[in-house]
Image (cartoon, rainbow, N blue to C red):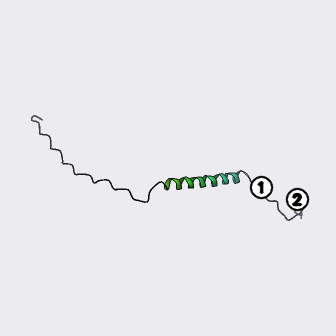
Amino acid sequence: MAVSRSRGRGDSVAAKPGSDAYTGLLGISLLAMIAGTIFLYLDYSQYSSKKPDLPPAPTAIKPATPAPAQPGK
C-alpha cells in the first residue's frame, strides 16, 4: 500500500488564502448598499410628518338634456 504524502514540508500550519476578485466585488456591493441607504434616508427626510390636505370633494354634475329626436330617422 502506498503511503500518502502531504504537500509541503509537513508543517501543520496552513497558509492563509489571499483575497480574490470576489472579495473585491463583495466590498463594492457593500459600498453600494451603504450609498443606497444614505440616498433613501435623504429622500425620506424631505417629507414632512404632517399628512397632506385632502382634495375637495367632486361636485355633482347635472346630466345633459337629451337631444331632441329628429323626425325622419
**Secondary structure state at the residue bearing disc 2:** loop
Residue drawn at x 59%, y 52% is: 35
Q: Could you classify mark 2 by the number of other residues whose Cα lies within 10 Å: few (under 14), some (14-19), or many (20 or more)?
A: few
Q: Position of residue 36 (x, y in %)?
A: 57, 53
The crowd level at tag 1 (other Cα within 10 Å; few <14, some 14-19, many 20+) is few
Q: Secondary structure at mark 1?
A: loop
Q: Horizontal and vertical percent for residue 46?
A: 48, 54
Q: Nearer the viewer, residue 14 or 43?
A: 43
Left or right of 73, for residue 33? right
Nearer the observer, 6 or 43: 43
Q: Amino acid at mark 2?
A: Gly
Answer with the quarter of the image where residue 71 lies.
top left
Q: Which numbered circle lies on residue 46? A: none
Is there CB contact under 8 Å for labels 1 and 2?
Answer: no
Which residue position is annotated with label 1? Answer: 18
Answer above or below: position of 35 versus 67: below
Return the residue found at the far left: 71
Q: Quadrant of residue 38?
A: bottom right
Q: Position of residue 24 (x, y in %)?
A: 69, 52
Name the residue nearer the viewer: 17 or 49: 49
Task: Name the residue rendered at 73%, 52% in the picture.
Answer: 20
Q: Residue at x 11, y 39 (%)?
A: 69
Q: Which mark is drawn over residue 8?
A: 2
Q: Position of residue 63 (x, y in %)?
A: 18, 47
Q: Which of the image's four quarters has the N terminus?
A: bottom right
Considering only order in the chain, which callout, 2 or 1, is on the residue closer to the N terminus?
A: 2
